[in-house]
Image: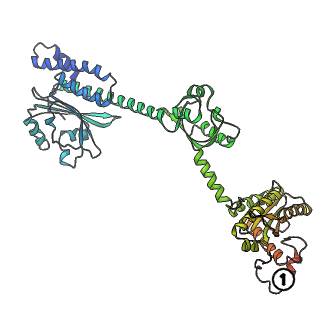
Amino acid sequence: MSDSPDDSNQPSARFWRLLGRGGQSDSNLRRQQQLLAWREALGAILLSRRSEKDLMQRFCDSVLHNQVASFAAILLPNADGILQTVALAGSRSILAGVQCSIHADLPEGQGPLGLVWRDARPFYSSRLHNGPALRTWTERLHQQGISSTAVIPLSRLQKPWGLLLLLRKEGEAWPSDEQMLLESTARVLAETLEDVAIYELQATLGAGLRSAFDAVVLTDASKRVLYVNQSFTLMTGYRNEEILERGLKILQGPDTSVQELASLDHALSQESSWEGKLLNYRRDGTEFWNHISIIPIRDTAGVLTHYLGLLRDVSREQQLFEQLDYESRHDRLTGLANRRALDDELELAIARAKRNESHLAVCMIDLDHFKPINDLYGHEAGDQVLRAVSRRLRDSLRRTDYVARLGGDEFVVLIEGYRNLDELELVLIKIEAGVNAPILLSDGREVAVRLSMGICRVPEDGVQDLANLLRYADQALYRAKALRGERSQYWVFHQDVRFGLRLENRAGLLSKPAEEDEP
C-alpha cells in the first residue's frame, strides 16, 4: 500500500529522466544522489561476509550515514509473533515501549508493521495518514517529529522473515522512484542475509562434524572417502589421509559379518540408507563393535551425490548385551544352558533330525543320593556337587551333543546323530562312568551320586514336538527312579513296555516317588 503519487508506468525510466531534468528541485536531486551513493556503499558492506547480526547492524548504520533516513531498524518476530528489534540505528526512544505483533487478532497487530508482514507488501506514508488502524502509530511518529515512514518486508526462502523500518524527519513522502530503489535494496539485503545464514549454518555444521563425539565419514556417490573427522581417527587409529588412500574396507577383518556386509552393499546399490552393527578392527588390530548409520545425500534434482556415515563404538554396549543374553540363557550356578536355551536348541535339533532323517535322543536326568548330601553337608556342598556333575556331563558328551540344567538336580541331555542303539548306549555308558566317580568336596570329604535317566527318541518313539518329547522323557525318568532296583542300567526308554507294565502292577506307585534318603 502507498500514499505517494505514481504518474508513470515505468518508474525506473522516469527515475533516470528526473536525474537529468534541469528543472528538478535541488532537494530531490540531492536525495536521489544520496540513495545512489548509499547503494554503492552497501556493495562493500554486503560482500564483507560478516556475521548475519553484524551485517544487519552495518546496513542500518549505512542508512543514517548516507542520510537515506533518520532512523532504521530491522525487526524479526519471536515465537509469540511479537516483533523484536535485532538491528537499529537512530534514536532508540522512537520504539521504546512499543509492542507490535504480526497477528491480526491483536491490537498490537493493527499497525503498519503487522499489515506489511501479513500482506507481504511495502508500506509508505506521511504523518498526514489518519486511517483508524494507523492513528496511534501516526500520533506517536508526529510526537517524534517523523515526517514519513517506510516498512519493507524481508523474505527468506520465499517466506516472510523480517521487516525493514525506515523513518525520515524531513522531506516529502517517499516518491515512487525511491520506493523502487528501497525495495530492490531490501531484496539484495534479504538475499545476502540468506546466503550468510546458509554459510554460517554450514560452518556450524562443519565445526559440529569435526568435533562430534561420533565418527563421521563423507564419501562421494562412488563410495570414495572424501573426509573423516577427528573422532574417526580417535576411534580407529587411522588418519584422514590413510582412509582416503585405502578406503573403509581397511576396517574389516576375519570375523566381520559377511551377511551384514552384503546387506550394506545391497542398500547402497539401491541408493538407500542403512543401519546396523559390524565387528571392525582398529589400526592396532584390536576388535570393536561399530554401530553404523549411512545416509544418502541428494542434490535439488534428487540425484545422489554423497553418502554420510555416522559411526559409534558400541563395544561396551555389545558386551553388556552379550552378558545379559548369556545370563538369560544359562544357569548361574553351573554355567549350563537353562530351560529357555534348551527349548530353542531342542526345536533346532528336532528340525535337523527331520531334515537329515537322523536320530535324536532327549534324555531327562535326575541325581540319586543328592538330597542326603545336601541335608548332611549343607547347600554349599550340594552346589559343589552340582557344579562337578555339570562339568562331567559336558566332558562326557560329544561335540555335537547338548546339556542343560532345568533346576535342582535335574538335567537334560540331547544326543544327536547316533546311527543305532548300540552307539547311543556307548554315549550313555560314558556319561555314567564320568558322573559316578567320587566327588571331592572343598573340606576334603568324598561323596558320590548316581544317575536315573528317562529317554524319548526321535523317530523311534513317534514323537516330534518339543513339549511331548520332554514330557515323555520325564515319564520315562519317573519309571527309572521308581523301579531303580529292578533295572539293569540307569536309563529307561519311553516305550520300554517291560518297565511300564511293572510300574502299573506295583501297588501304591500312583505318584512320582519322593527323593530317597539313603546317603
If the image is split into quadrants, where does the C terminus sit? bottom right
Where's residue 26, x and y in %?
10, 16
At label 1, the amino acid type is Glu
Which residue is at the front of the view, 311 or 393?
Answer: 393
Horizontal side, residue 41 vs residue 169: left or right = right
Q: Residue furthest bottom?
A: 507
Where's residue 319, x and y in %?
62, 49
Which residue is at the front of the view, 252 or 238?
Answer: 238
If the image is split into quadrants, where does the N terminus sit? top left
Which residue is at the front of the view, 154 or 515?
Answer: 515
Q: Secondary structure at mark 1?
A: helix
The answer to whether one can see residue 14 in this image is no
Residue drawn at (80%, 77%) of the image: 518
The answer to whether one can see residue 497 in this image is yes
Residue at image mark 1? 504
Horizontal side, residue 517 vs residue 218: left or right = right
Q: In the figure, residue 402 lies in which quadrant?
A: bottom right
Residue drawn at (22%, 38%) of the image: 116
